[in-house]
Amino acid sequence: MRALLRLFVITGILGGFVVGCSETDSAVEPAPTLEEAAAPPPSVSSVPALTEEEAERAEFQYFDRCSGCHGALRKGATGPNITDEKMLEKTLAELEETIFEGTEAGMPGWGRTGEMTQAEAELMARFVQNPVPIPPEMGLEAMKATHQVHIPVSERPGKPEHDRNIDNLFGYILRDAGKVAIIDGDTKEAASVFDTGFAVHIFRASATGRYFYTIGRDGKLTLIDLFQEKPQVVAEVRVCLDARSVDVSKYNGPKGDFVDKLAIVGCYWPPQMVIVDGQTLEPIKVVSTRSSTYDTNEYHPEPRVATIVASHFDSEWVVAIKETGMVWLVDYSDLDNLQMTQIATERFLHDGGWDATKRYLLIAANMRDQIAVVDTKEKKFVTKFETGTKPHPGRGANWIDPEYGAVSATTHLGEGLIAVYGSDPENHPEHAWKVVREQETAGPGLFLKTHPESNHVWTDSTLSKDEGVNQQICVFRKDDFDAGPKCWKAADHGKVVHFEYNKAGDEVWASVWDKQGEIVIYDDKTLEEKKRITADWLVTPTGKWNVYNTVHDIY
Ligand code: DHE
C-alpha cells in the first residue's frame, strides 16, 4: 500500500469526504470451502490493467473516501463487500456509474458531490476489480520513529499562561485543511489554529481538562496543551495508518491514580488498539483486535476499533470492536498482565456514549438498526433494541422526559428519525431500553445534542440528498417533544453538521461544512442566531468539543 505508506511522511494532504455508506448488510463472508479455495483465480485477462501511478492514486482515493465504510480489505462493514471476486461480477461501466452517481441505499455519488471526476470514477472502477492490496502492519518500533515531544513535560507551564476561561474553550476540526482551531467560547475568537493529522476525526479532553487529544484519519495522535499562551501541539505520534478514536485514563482509586497518565487510540488499520503515555504520547503497548465474530465465531481479519470511552467505575477503557460486535473492557492498571472482559453485543458497532448516570454505554450497531446497552459497573451486556434505519447517535443525548423519566436518543443515517428510549432501569424499569417516543426530522442526519440546562434537543439532517435539506437544523422541546420540531435553514451553502453547547448550556454551536465554512452560534433559549463566524482559516469545519462538556461527558 504505497499510498498509505506515503501518508507516513505527508501531512496536511487536502481531500474531501462525504460520510455515508451503502446499505447492503454485509456480514463477514464465511471462510471458503476447500473446493472454493482450490478454485482457480479469475483469469488475469479479465482484470483491467492499472499503471503503477494509477494504482497509487487509486489506493489513496480508496483510503480517503471508501475504506471507512468498506474496510481496508474491502470485505465490507457499513458498506458491502467489494473484493475483486465480487466486483468482477459487474461491468466496468456499472461500477463507474455507481461510484459517480451513488446508490439509493446510501452510498454518496462521488461525482455528483464534485469529489471525483468522471476519469477518477473510471479509475476506481478498475481499481476495485483488481486484487486487494494488503496494507502494511505497524508495530511499536515504527510508531516510535514518528514520536516527537515538542515541549517536554518539565518545560510546560504549571498554570495557564493566558487569562482565557479554559473550561469554555472549544476544539474545532478543520477537516480538509489538516488543521484544528482552539476557539475561545467567551470571546468567540480563535486562540490558535495549527496543523494536526490528516482529516482529524475527534477531540477528547484529558480528565483534568488541561489537554486536548486529537486523532487523525492517518492515525496521527496529537496532544494539545491548553495552558500554553497559544494552545499548541506539545507531543505527537503516529500509531496506525487509519484511525477514528482516542480516549484517556480517568480512574483514581484503590488500583492507583491514573488521571491523565495513559491514552488509548483505536485503529481501523492495522486492526489494533495502542496504549500510549498520556503526557508524552510515547507508545507503550499494542493489542491486536483480530479475533472472531460474537455470533458465528468466524475469524475476522479486520475488526476495527469504533467508539472508546473511559469507565467511571474502574480502571478500564470501554472499546467497541466494530466487525466482531464485541465490547472489550480493557483494564489499564497493569499493562504487563493486561486483563480484558469481552462482552458480546451486536455487529458493526459504530458510535455511542453514556446514559446520564455514566454507567451504561449505549452504542449503535448501525447495520443491525440497533442500540446495544453495556453495563460498565456490572461489566456485562444488558440488552439491545431496534430504533430505526441505521442509528447514529454521535455520543447521544440524555434528558428527563416529563412522562418517561430519564431518556436517551439517537438520530439515524437511513431516515429522518429521532428515536427516544428510556434509560433509567432503576426508577423507570418499565420504560428502560424501549423506544418511548419517535419524531421525524428534516432528513437523515448524523448528530443530536442537548445539555442539562437546556429544554432543547438539536438535530441535523446532513445526509439528506434533497436540495437545501442538508442545510437545515431541527430543534425539539423536551417538555413537549411530540409537538414536533421547529426547523430552519441555517446556511445557503455547504452542509450543516454537529452541535456542541458552551459550558453554561445556553449557547449552541453548529458547523457549515464547506470549503469556506462558517460557525453559527445560537441562543439556546430563543433559538435566535447570536453570531456567525467566517474567516480564511475556517476550511471545512465539522466536529467541535467544549472542554468542560467533554471532560464531564455532558450531552
Ligand atoms: Fe465519524 C465519531 C467513524 C465519517 C464526524 N466516527 C465517530 C466514531 C467513529 C466514527 C468510530 C466514534 C468515535 C468515538 O466516540 O470514540 N466516521 C467514522 C467512519 O468510519 C466514517 C463513517 C467514514 C470515514 O471514513 O471516516 C465517519 N465522521 C465522518 C464524517 O464524514 C464526519 C461527519 C465529518 C468529519 O469531520 O470526518 C464525521 N464522527 C464525526 C464526529 C464524531 C464522530 C464529529 C464525534 C461525535 C461527538 O460528538 O463526539
Image (spheres, rainbow, N blue to C red):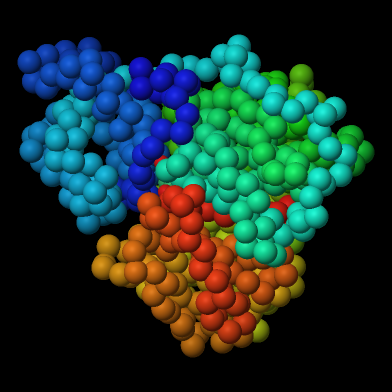
Tell me: residue 254, above or below residue 451: above
The percent coordinates of residue 536 (x first, y second) are: 46, 52
Residue 81 in the image: state x and y as whole percent.
29, 36
Say which quarter of the image contains residue 2. top left
Horizontal and vertical percent for residue 304?
Answer: 49, 34
In the image, residue 350 sits, relative to residue 10, either above or below, namely: below
Near-viewer residue (230 or 53): 230
Along the viewing direction, whichever of 134 and 290 lies nearer the viewer: 134
Residue 94 appears in the rendering: yes
Residue shown at 67% from the left, 64% from the top? 187
The structure residue drawn at horizontal position 89% and vertical position 34%, both measured from the top left corner, is 256
The one of 295 and 11 positioned closer to us in this rendering:
11
Label count reads 0
Give the vertical position of 404 relative to 177 (above or below): below
Quadrant of the frame with the N terminus: top left
Which residue in the rendered view is the most extreme toward the front? 536
Q: Is 270 on the left or on the right of 145, as rendered?
A: left
Q: Residue at x 53, y 53 (%)?
A: 543
Comparing 199 with 180, the one in front is: 180
On the picture, is 269 further left or further right than 163? Answer: left
The x and y percentages for residue 395 are 58, 56
Q: Is residue 347 visible?
A: no
